[in-house]
Amino acid sequence: MGRSKENSNSKINRTLLITGIIFVLSGIIALTIILNKGVIFGKRLIPLVAKEKEEPEHVIQVVSSNNYLKDINDKVELTITIDGEDVTNGEGYELTSSDESIVTIEGNTATATGLGDAVITARSTELDIEGTVTISVVVPASKLTLSAEFEKIKVGETSQISHTTRPTEATGVQVRLDYTSSDNEIATVSNSGIVTGKAPGTVTITATDKITGLSDSYDITVTM
């Protein structure tokens, strides 16, 4: 009687042990499948849920053949594209100027009416999108001359490049300058004309006016 009860308990214990082992193995397999995104032993057991197809984003662009107008009544043609397709001579958009006292719009033509900056907006009449371009009406420079705060600087020091124009800026002349250094290992120059010494030597800093193409240069010497 005692032996029969002992055998019964042994069977129960073995059953519980096997059940426990199966439960642990099932958990390990399930965790492995989750961590491998449904793939186990090189096979995908759980199909990926297909993502909903997103609608493509539409883009409208307006491009000016010249962003700087130099005289009142100067004109420039505008090109409009929607999703990369030229729609300039078609329909489906409208053009507006942020300030008609500076630039007016007629058709696809922008006309200068006064000095300053105007933002031209192309807006789709079918899609909820718009694009912009800035047109500046300026008095162009006829001469550009550079100078520097310091002709000689030490490594780590800075010197501000300045400019003068003819006609003078007091008459309303504008320049949009791009600065470059002849050797960035000796000295670098920022977009605002600040030169920073990097190593001993002499560099040439050049400023070019994006409106007229005028340029001038100035040499800066860097010492220890």
Image: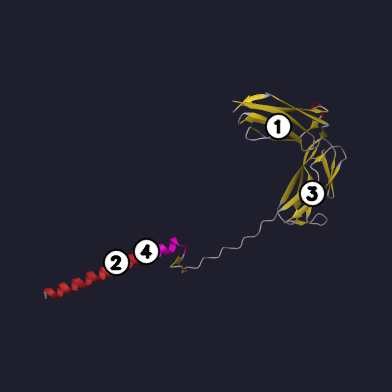
Q: Which residue is mark 2?
A: 20
Q: Which residues are magenta?
A: 29-37
The mark that comes first in sequence, 1 or 3, is: 3
> What secondary structure is found at the residue carrying circle 4?
helix
CA separation in Å, label 4 and label 2 = 12 Å
| Circle nearer the viewer, 4 or 2 | 4
Circle 1 Cα neighbour tier, 10 Å, few/some/many (<14 / 14–19 / ≥20)? many
State how far apart marks 4 and 1 are (Cα).
67 Å
Q: Nearer the viewer, mark 4 or mark 1?
A: 1
Give the x, y percent position of residue 184: 64, 35
Q: Give the Cα separation between the discs numbered 3 and 2.
A: 74 Å
Q: Amino acid at mark 4?
A: Ile
Q: Which mark is residue 95?
A: 3
In the displayed structure image, the side of residue 115 where residue 131 appears, left or right = left
Q: Residue at position x 21%, y 73% from top?
A: 11
Quadrant including the C terminus: top right
